[in-house]
């Protein structure tokens, strides 16, 4: 393709991009081509970074990209500044614009969105972001905020979720350089809103005018009776005016009646106000009297309280003196009794002293007993030495035995743990996933909180039959399933989820198996075919037969991993896969259907195992094969170490022998210890007997000494003289008696005062009660009078309001009368209308309404007039007067209506033409894919508007939208594209075809789409890519180099092999090799050398016959087996 067919850069196209310290790039420069630019590379290398740089470099905000809100987040890690430099193609004979944006990490507020962190430059001169945006949008018509022209990776999902109104807005923005369609649409929405905000003040006059026009239409049909109809119409007008004035007269009479009612209410209110004053004065006097009595009662009550306190005080004194007097009398009696008791005790003490002295003389001497004690102590010390020695030996041997037994238990537990595969597996699982240990422990401690059993983690509940089975199961089932838990009811699911997520703040995967029941399953293959697979191809069984698990766990694995549909084979199976086309046999449907079945099978080849997965495209019915190496099991394997087990058994045997030897030693030491204990106990018994005799003699001596002292004390008490004490006590008793009598006299005086005060308070309380009763009666009268006053006051207020309302209505009617049927001119002179109205033979509104109805009936009974046009022109002037009444009121609304009509027609026409073009292209493109599609313009209708004369309905402009309707299967119906109805691949296909349909109509010099081809199957991806290339590389029109669809940036992590049209000169491919495993020096990359190596490798593979032909409809070549290690 020549350069003339490729074309040159359109003004506004990006010719150069330079980045420094921006995300994954340290420093790089891109030079895109003028047409289709394919940016390819592995994930994480920086493909989307190019689009991010274009958006930010052209003045866009980070939120447009959907991945960050702060532009400082785009600075490379560990760097303080980032630089974006974008050069665009200028207009002919215009200056080239180079936009630069410098982002500094330490500028701008810490809590803001980095607005102050950016500095903008235009051709090396500092400027503002708004100025950059103005140049980009107004001069070059670039809209980085429009998803139809700029669709970054993180906003792809936003496009498919647009409602029809949002999609129309984005489409309108992209269809004109000045965004005329979009701005006109917005203006129409504003005008319609202003129009709807207006009131309905002209509706009554419109209705009246409508009736007159209907009358005129009828008159047009009645030529012969024209004059009669004209008179009837004039009569109708006069009656209508007469009715207005009659209504005014009735309202005036009603106002006079209301005024009389108001005056009467005012008079009654004044009389009530005068009768209210004496009652208020009398109530105040009674209230004052009650207050005085209450004050007097308070003073007398205080006197009574004082007398009561005096009585209580004297009563307390009397009680105290009485108690003291009783105590003194008791003390006097006690002195006499103690003297007699001391004499008795002295006689008894002397007898006891004599008895103790005689008993002491009969006992052995203490010195002799002490000598015996010393001999006994020496005997005990002689026996204690051997006893302590044997005790130490026994304790030492017993401690060694205990240590030996502990060692036995430790080794037994260690062997038990080694032999317990489930425990080993749990430890391995918990070691790899520490959070699971916390969750499992929490469930074990809180099992009583759940309604049914809780199982898990799933990996800990499985017992695989072979090592290969463990590896197969780990390869096939997702890790999150093994780390998950199984419950048997929805209530336990909710409780467990909230306990772990909210309580432990940990993630958890939960599967529900209702009632923990194992459901019936339907195998992938019939019994006959399965038997043949076992006999001829070495199939061992299904994957769910290779392990043992509780029913809830088994059902969960069937639900989550479909383990009951996976076959397990051996080396013979691998041979059948390689040489006998076993996969084709497995994919063939048994019911005769032409659509192949997906399948999954494990096979082995010596020490290696493989997983074959065959999937079927939902569109083309073609099959694709994936082969994975099977790695060694990580956590389903029990992990028993034979060397550790043998070592543990040896140590257990040695510990058991040591314990047996120590047991024999302990028995010998125990016998020696028993003999030493017996000798020590005999010596101790003799010592205790001697010590007891010694203690008896010592205690007896102590008793004799204590008794002598007691006898001496009793002699002193008996010989003591207490006469003076008795005389003092008698005198004290006399004084107590005098104080008691004095207290009784004071109490009697206080009691008399209390009686007098009580009598006074009773009289005052009685007077107060009587005064209060009279005051309440006056209050009741006053309350009733006030209620009556309030009623009259409300009545007067109501009468005033009614009169004011009636006056308002009357004045409004009068204003209407003087406007519609004036009886006097400006100089107050009667007009002819007054005489005509007075001449009418009606005096009431009812009579006028009856006459009006009669005139209308008469007018409506006139025949048609054949000279319609002549009569129409004649009668049109007769209704001008009525229309003038509405002219001023409708001028503003009519102006807006006319403005809407003037704008709507060209806008609607242009929009319909554009949507029709897009629809035609979209339908064609979808048809190429074997699908159907349609772009529908949805109009809004305002139900509140109706047809007025020949005016069309007013559109509800804010409800206008665009719907993408698609159909992907022949038997299905056309439906609106939505995330709820269509898959991700279907939405991606529809979206990119819609963008392709818009491409020729767009004014933006470039468009960007990031990874929109992800989720497409191979067939659709090839067709979509072919359409993108065709639309984006179409030759310029009219031999003008820049008259083409502009630049197109397609970002993708991969491209299918053998894509068509890649050789076109309009396609520029950018391979991103930015990453830790790429060349240190980009110049080391030699494309020619790579292509040559690839060709040689392909030839070698063909010679080795490592390719076979698949049996699908496309008959494409595929590798016999490709191995990919799964991390």
Image (cartoon, rainbow, N blue to C red):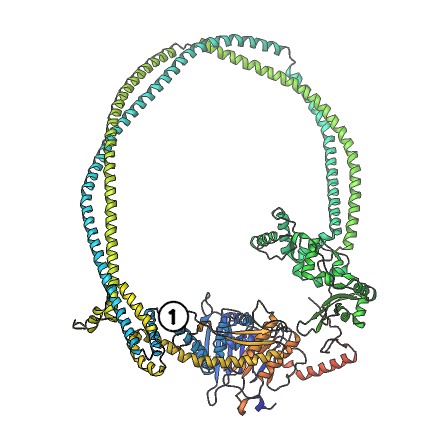
Q: Position of residue 1030 (x, y in %)?
A: 60, 84
Which one is in front, 577 or 1103? 577
Q: Is residue 309 above or below residue 579?
A: above
1068 relative to 819 in the view: left or right? right
- In the displayed orientation, state which residue is furthest to the right: 535
Task: Give the position of the C terminus as an image quadrant.
Answer: bottom right
Which one is in front, 368 or 927? 927
Q: Position of residue 311 (x, y in %)?
A: 30, 22
Q: Position of residue 70 (x, y in %)?
A: 49, 69
Q: Position of residue 650 (x, y in %)?
A: 79, 49
Q: Is residue 644 above or below residue 926?
A: above
118 relative to 772 in the view: left or right? right
Total number of numbered discs in the rendering: 1
Is residue 459 in view? Answer: no
Q: Secondary structure at mark 1?
A: helix
Which one is in front, 759 or 991? 991
Is residue 754 in view? Answer: yes
Q: Is residue 59 above or below residue 304?
A: below
Residue assigned mark 1: 196
Q: Around disc 1, counting alpha carbons within 10 Å, would you say few (fewer than 14), some (14 to 19), or many (20 or more)?
A: few
Residue pictured at 23% horizontal, 30% vertical: 767
Task: Give the position of the N terminus as an image quadrant.
Answer: bottom right
Residue pictured at 67% horizontal, 84% vertical: 1088
């Amino acid at each position: 393709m020549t350069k003339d067919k490729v074309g040159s850069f359109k003004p506004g196209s990006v010719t150069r991009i330079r980045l420094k310290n921006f995300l994954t790039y340290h420093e790089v420069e891109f030079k895109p081509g003028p047409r289709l630019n394919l940016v390819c590379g592995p994930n994480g290398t920086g493909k989307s970074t190019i689009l991010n740089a274009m958006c930010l470099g052209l003045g866009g905000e980070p939120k447009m990209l959907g991945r960050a809100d702060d532009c400082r987040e785009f600075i490379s890690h560990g760097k303080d500044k980032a630089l974006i430099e974008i050069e665009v193609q200028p207009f002919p004979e215009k200056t080239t614009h180079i936009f630069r944006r410098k982002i500094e990490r330490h500028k701008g507020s810490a809590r803001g969105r980095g607005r102050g962190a950016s500095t903008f430059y235009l051709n090396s001169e500092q400027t503002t972001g708004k100025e950059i945006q103005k140049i980009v949008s107004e001069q070059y018509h670039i809209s980085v905020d429009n998803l139809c022209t700029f669709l970054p990776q993180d906003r792809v999902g936003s496009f498919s979720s647009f409602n029809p109104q949002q999609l129309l807005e984005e489409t309108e923005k992209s269809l004109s350089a000045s965004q005329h369609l979009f701005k006109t649409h917005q203006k129409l929405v504003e005008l319609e809103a202003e129009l709807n905000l207006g009131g309905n003040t002209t509706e009554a006059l419109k209705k009246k005018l409508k009736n007159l026009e209907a009358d005129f239409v009828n008159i047009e049909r009645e030529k012969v009776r024209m004059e009669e109809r004209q008179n009837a119409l004039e009569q109708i007008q006069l009656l209508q005016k007469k009715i207005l004035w009659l209504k005014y007269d009735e309202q005036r009479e009603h106002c006079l009646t209301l005024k009389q009612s108001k005056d009467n209410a005012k008079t009654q209110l004044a009389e009530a106000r005068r009768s209210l004053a004496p009652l208020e004065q009398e109530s105040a006097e009674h209230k004052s009297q009650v207050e005085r009595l209450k004050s007097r009662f308070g003073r007398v009550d205080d006197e009574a309280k004082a007398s009561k306190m005096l009585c209580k005080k004297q009563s307390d004194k009397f009680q105290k003196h009485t108690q003291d007097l009783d105590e003194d009398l008791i003390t006097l009696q006690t002195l006499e009794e103690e003297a007699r008791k001391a004499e008795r005790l002295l006689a008894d003490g002397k007898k006891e002293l004599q008895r103790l002295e005689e008993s002491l003389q009969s006992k052995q001497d203490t010195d002799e007993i002490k000598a015996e004690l010393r001999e006994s102590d020496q005997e005990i010390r002689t026996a204690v030495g051997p006893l302590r020695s044997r005790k130490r030996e026994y304790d030492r041997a017993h401690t060694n035995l205990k240590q030996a037994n502990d060692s036995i238990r430790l080794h037994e537990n260690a062997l038990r743990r080694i032999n317990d595969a489930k425990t080993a597996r749990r430890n391995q699982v918990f070691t790899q996933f520490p959070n699971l240990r916390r969750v499992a422990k929490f469930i074990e401690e809180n099992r009583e909180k759940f309604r049914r059993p809780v199982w898990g983690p799933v990996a800990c509940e499985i017992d695989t039959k072979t090592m290969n089975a463990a590896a197969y199961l780990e390869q096939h089932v997702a890790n999150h399933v093994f780390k998950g838990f199984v419950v048997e009811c929805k209530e336990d699911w909710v409780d467990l989820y909230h306990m772990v997520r909210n309580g432990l703040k940990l993630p958890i995967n939960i599967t529900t198996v209702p009632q923990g029941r194992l459901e019936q399953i339907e195998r992938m293959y019939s019994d006959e075919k399965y038997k043949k697979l076992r006999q001829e191809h070495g199939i061992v069984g299904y994957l769910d037969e290779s392990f043992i698990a509780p029913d809830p766990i088994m059902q969960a694995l069937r639900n989550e991993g479909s383990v009951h549909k996976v076959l397990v084979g051996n080396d013979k199976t691998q041979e059948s896969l390689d040489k006998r086309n076993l996969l084709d046999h497995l994919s063939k449907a048994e019911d005769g259907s032409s659509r192949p079945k997906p399948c999954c099978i494990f096979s082995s080849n010596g020490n290696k195992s493989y997983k074959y997965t065959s999937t079927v495209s939902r569109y083309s019915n073609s099959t694709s094969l994936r082969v994975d190496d099977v790695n060694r099991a990580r956590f389903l394997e029990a992990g028993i170490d034979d060397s550790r087990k043998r070592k543990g058994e040896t140590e257990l045997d040695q510990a058991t022998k040591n314990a047996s030897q120590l047991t024999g030693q302990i028995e010998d030491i125990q016998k020696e210890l028993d003999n030493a204990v017996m000798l020590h106990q005999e010596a101790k018994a003799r010592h205790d007997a001697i010590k007891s005799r010694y203690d008896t003699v010592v205690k007896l001596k102590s008793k004799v000494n204590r008794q002598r002292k007691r006898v001496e004390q009793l002699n002193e008490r008996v010989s003591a003289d207490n006469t003076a004490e008795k005389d003092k006590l008698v005198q004290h008793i006399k004084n107590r008696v005098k104080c008691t009598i004095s207290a009784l006299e004071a109490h009697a005086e206080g009691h008399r005062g209390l009686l007098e005060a009580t009598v006074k308070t009773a009289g005052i309380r009685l007077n107060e009660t009587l005064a209060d009763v009279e005051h309440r009666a006056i209050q009741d009268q006053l309350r009733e009078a006030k209620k009556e006053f309030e009623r009259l006051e409300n009545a007067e207020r109501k009468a005033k309001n009614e009169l004011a309302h009636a006056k308002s209505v009357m004045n409004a009617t009068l204003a209407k009368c003087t406007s519609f049927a004036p009886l006097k001119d400006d100089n107050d002179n009667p007009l002819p209308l007054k005489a005509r109205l007075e001449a009418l033979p009606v005096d009431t509104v009812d009579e006028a309404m009856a006459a009006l109805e009669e005139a209308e009936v008469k007018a409506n009974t006139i025949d048609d007039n054949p000279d319609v046009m002549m009569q129409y022109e004649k009668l049109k002037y007769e209704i001008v007067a009525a229309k003038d009444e509405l002219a001023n009121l409708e001028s503003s609304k009519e102006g807006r209506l006319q403005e809407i009509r003037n704008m709507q027609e060209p806008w609607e026409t242009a929009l319909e033409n554009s949507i029709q073009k897009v629809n035609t292209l979209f339908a064609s493109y979808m048809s190429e894919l074997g699908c159907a599609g349609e772009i529908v313009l949805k109009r809004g209708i305002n139900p509140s508007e109706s047809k007025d004369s020949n005016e069309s309905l007013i559109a509800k402009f804010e409800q206008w939208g665009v719907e993408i309707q698609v159909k992907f299967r022949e038997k299905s119906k056309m439906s609106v594209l939505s995330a709820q109805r269509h898959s991700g691949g279907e939405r991606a296909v529809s979206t990119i075809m819609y963008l392709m349909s818009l491409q020729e109509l767009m004014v933006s010099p470039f468009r960007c789409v990031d990874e929109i081809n992800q989720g497409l199957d191979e067939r659709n991806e090839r067709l979509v890519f072919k359409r993108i290339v065709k639309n984006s590389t179409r030759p310029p029109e009219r031999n003008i180099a820049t008259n083409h669809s502009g630049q197109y940036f397609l970002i993708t992590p991969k491209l299918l092999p053998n894509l068509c049209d890649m050789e076109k000169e309009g396609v520029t491919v950018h391979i991103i090799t930015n990453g830790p495993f790429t060349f240190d020096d980009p110049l080391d990359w030699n494309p020619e050398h790579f292509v040559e190596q690839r060709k040689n490798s392909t030839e070698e593979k063909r010679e080795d016959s490592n390719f076979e032909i698949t049996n699908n409809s496309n008959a494409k070549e595929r590798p016999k087996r490709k191995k990919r290690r799964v991390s």
